[in-house]
Image (cartoon, rainbow, N blue to C red):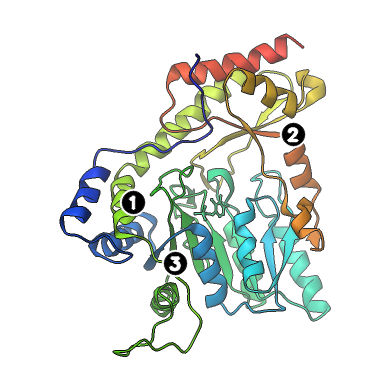
């Protein structure tokens, strides 16, 4: 049996278990406790955020973010189209409608000029969105400054979905810390994981306090159970926060390992005809959470799907780049500004195994697999 090589798997350091043990020994087996507080503080230090609330998932953090900036039923919310569906689902939870914005080719993230045009157009017809949700894809920051400028011009809050971009930089700072609210994910496939979990950050202490309040069933201060608003059960477990504290210690190593994966893939494959790697934009440093490339079938001799299937037969898991949300049946009724760039990246884009725990031998197997497909076609 050959060993399967998976896309992105959890990679524990050597402190996580000690923190979990501490939670057991002190009986803080609850969605509150010292690890939760410490994880929030330590996370703020790592990303340079003012305040943070640890929650049960990145999706929960996004839902809270939309609620906190006042997104309500009937509102429209701008959203990157090239992303995982979790970016947009919370817009629907709020009864609002996503309007999608296409990517640019230099970063694969939201095109700032297109956003500016879309806002100008919506302003002219008197239908501005209530918020903009900006995704930082595959470990690379979007071009935040012009996007923030466009949002500020129309006084629209920017929510940053940095679920895939923890450890990346934009002009020296962490994506997720520029907008009104930023969110991160610690799902099992992300660069660090708590098995499941998320973080909401903001410079506004009141906003983060309100996030914690909403995440704990919106319980008013009172000896009995008193509620004046609808809340959620979204807090992170103290046990899982312990895992998160351990993982934060190795974040830099995880980034280095994923960038090393990319370097090995790129040096071995970038000269093959028809192969192009996701570019690294010059304004920051990507983590290469996933190494992604595009395949031009004419030049390469096989298309994205043929490559994916051939690798899969060798027990190597690869995945197509996210299917744009404006092409998803569930969002069939939603508008999209542009769309051809994201469509093209989906048609030709493939994500390679990218875990920080891959060995040189694993990477070699992937490289050899792809090289063989080219030479056999
Ligand atoms: C993983 C992910 C999320 C959701 O995070 P969960 O913790 O899985 O809820 C949101 N947005 C993007 C872009 C993601 O990749």
Mark 3 and mark 1: Cα distance apart in space: 16 Å
Q: Position of residue 224 (x, y in %)?
A: 32, 89
**Location of the C terminus (image quadrant):** top right
Q: Residue at x 23, y 63 (%)?
A: 34
Mark 3 and mark 2: Cα distance apart in space: 37 Å
Q: Is residue 3 visible?
A: yes
Q: Earlier in the sequence, mark 3 or mark 2?
A: 3
Above or below, 198 relative to 364: below
Question: Quick check: 68 left or right of 305?
Answer: left
Give residue 348's mark. Answer: 2
Q: Position of residue 267 (x, y in %)?
A: 56, 21
Within 10 angstroms of label 3, few (less than 14), some, or many (20 or more) residues? many
Q: Quadrant location of residue 225?
A: bottom left
Q: Nearer the viewer, residue 4 or 37?
A: 4
Residue on which disc 3 sits: 234
* Mark 3, secondary structure of its residue: loop
Residue ranking furthest to the top: 376
Give residue 244's mark. Answer: 1
Q: Nearer the viewer, residue 269 or 225?
A: 225
Within 10 angstroms of label 1, few (less than 14), some, or many (20 or more) residues? many
Q: Residue at x 72, y 63 (%)?
A: 115
State which mark lies toward you, 3 or 1: 3
* Mark 1, secondary structure of its residue: helix
Mark 1 and mark 2: Cα distance apart in space: 35 Å
Above or below, 185 relative to 188: below
Q: Nearer the viewer, residue 362 or 255?
A: 362
Q: Position of residue 86 (x, y in %)?
A: 60, 56
């Amino acid at each position: 049996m050959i060993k399967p090589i998976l896309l992105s798997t959890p990679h524990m350091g050597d402190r996580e278990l000690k923190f979990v043990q501490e939670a057991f020994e002190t009986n803080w087996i609850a969605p509150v406790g010292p690890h939760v507080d410490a994880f929030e503080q330590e996370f703020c230090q790592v990303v340079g955020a003012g305040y943070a609330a640890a929650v049960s998932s990145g999706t929960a953090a996004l839902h809270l973010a939309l609620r906190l900036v006042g997104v309500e039923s009937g509102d429209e919310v701008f959203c990157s189209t090239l992303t995982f569906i979790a970016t947009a689902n919370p817009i629907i939870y709020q009864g609002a409608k996503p309007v999608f914005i296409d990517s640019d080719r230099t970063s694969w993230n939201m095109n700032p000029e297109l956003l500016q045009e879309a806002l100008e157009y919506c302003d002219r017809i008197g239908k501005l969105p209530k918020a903009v949700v900006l995704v930082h894809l595959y470990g690379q920051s979007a071009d935040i400054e012009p996007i923030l400028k466009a949002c500020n011009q129309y006084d629209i809050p920017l929510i940053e979905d940095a679920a895939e971009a923890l450890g990346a930089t934009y002009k020296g700072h962490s994506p997720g810390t520029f907008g009104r609210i930023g969110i991160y994910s610690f799902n099992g496939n992300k660069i660090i994981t708590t098995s499941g979990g998320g973080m909401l950050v903001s410079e506004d202490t009141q906003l983060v306090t309100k996030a914690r309040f909403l995440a704990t069933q919106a319980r008013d201060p009172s000896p009995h159970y008193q509620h004046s608003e609808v809340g959620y059960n979204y807090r992170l477990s103290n046990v899982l926060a312990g895992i998160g504290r351990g993982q934060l210690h190795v974040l830099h190593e995880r980034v280095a390992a994923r960038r090393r994966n990319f370097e090995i893939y790129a040096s071995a494959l970038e000269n093959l005809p028809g192969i192009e790697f996701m570019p690294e934009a010059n304004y920051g440093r990507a983590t290469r959470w996933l190494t992604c490339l595009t395949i031009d079938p004419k030049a390469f001799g096989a298309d994205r799907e043929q490559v994916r299937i051939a690798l899969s037969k060798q027990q190597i898991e690869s995945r197509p780049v996210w299917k744009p949300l404006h092409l998803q049946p569930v969002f069939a009724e939603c508008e999209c500004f542009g769309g051809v760039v994201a469509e093209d990246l989906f048609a030709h884009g493939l994500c390679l195994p990218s875990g920080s725990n891959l060995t040189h031998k694993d990477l070699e197997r992937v490289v050899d697999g792809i090289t063989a497909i080219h030479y056999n076609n």
